[in-house]
Amino acid sequence: MEEPISHFSQHPDYLLTMTQATKVLGYKDYRMVKKLVDQNLLVPLQVSGSKRLRFRYHDVMNLAKPRK
């Protein structure tokens, strides 16, 4: 018997890279995540000492929708 999968909110709120957020959301190209940022649906974080954007795991998962 398989273990039940816990809800994502029970996991730590890691910071994801643009590539990781793209994969979690099921996109093949990071430009779709950029579009979500431009539409203010996803808030990026700036980590000091880095030019790259990061995203909170819980924010990304709140946007993810299961396939039908």
Image (spheres, helix red, strand yellow):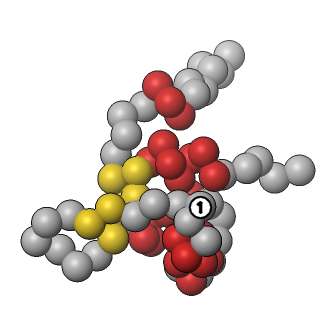
Query: Which quarter of the picture shows residue 36?
Result: bottom right
Name the residue at the top extreme: 1
> Which residue is found at the position 61% from the left and 71% from the top?
39
Q: Farthest residue toward the left?
A: 49
Residue closer to the observer: 36 or 2: 36
* Image position of 50 (left or right of 31): left
Query: Left or right: where does residue 21 sit relative to residue 56?
Result: right
Residue 64 in view of the camera: yes
Helix, strand or loop at mark 1: loop
Residue nearest the viewer, comparing 55 with 26: 55
Relative vertical location of residue 31 with respect to residue 6 in this rendering, above or below: below
Q: Is residue 33 visible?
A: no
Q: Residue at x 32, y 62 (%)?
A: 45
Categorize mark 1 by other alpha carbons within 10 Å: few (<14), some (14-19), many (20+): few
Q: Quadrant of the N terminus?
A: top right
Residue at x-position 46% and y-position 25%: 10
Location of residue 26 in the rendering, given as x and y in whole percent from the top left corner: 65, 64
In this rendering, position of residue 26 left or right of residue 8: right
Q: Position of residue 6 (x, y in %)?
A: 56, 24
Q: Position of residue 8 (x, y in %)?
A: 53, 34
The residue shown at (33%, 53%) is 15
Looking at the image, residue 33 sits to the left or right of residue 19; the answer is: right
* Residue type, mark 1 in image: Leu
> Going by the picture, which residue comes out furthest to the right?
68
Q: Can you identify the residue that label 1 sits on?
A: 41
Q: Quadrant location of residue 43? A: bottom left
Residue 18: x %, y % from top left: 42, 70
Q: Number of labelled discs?
A: 1
Q: Residue furthest front?
A: 40
In this view of the protein, which residue sits in the foreground, 9 or 37? 37
Position above or below: 45 against 7: below
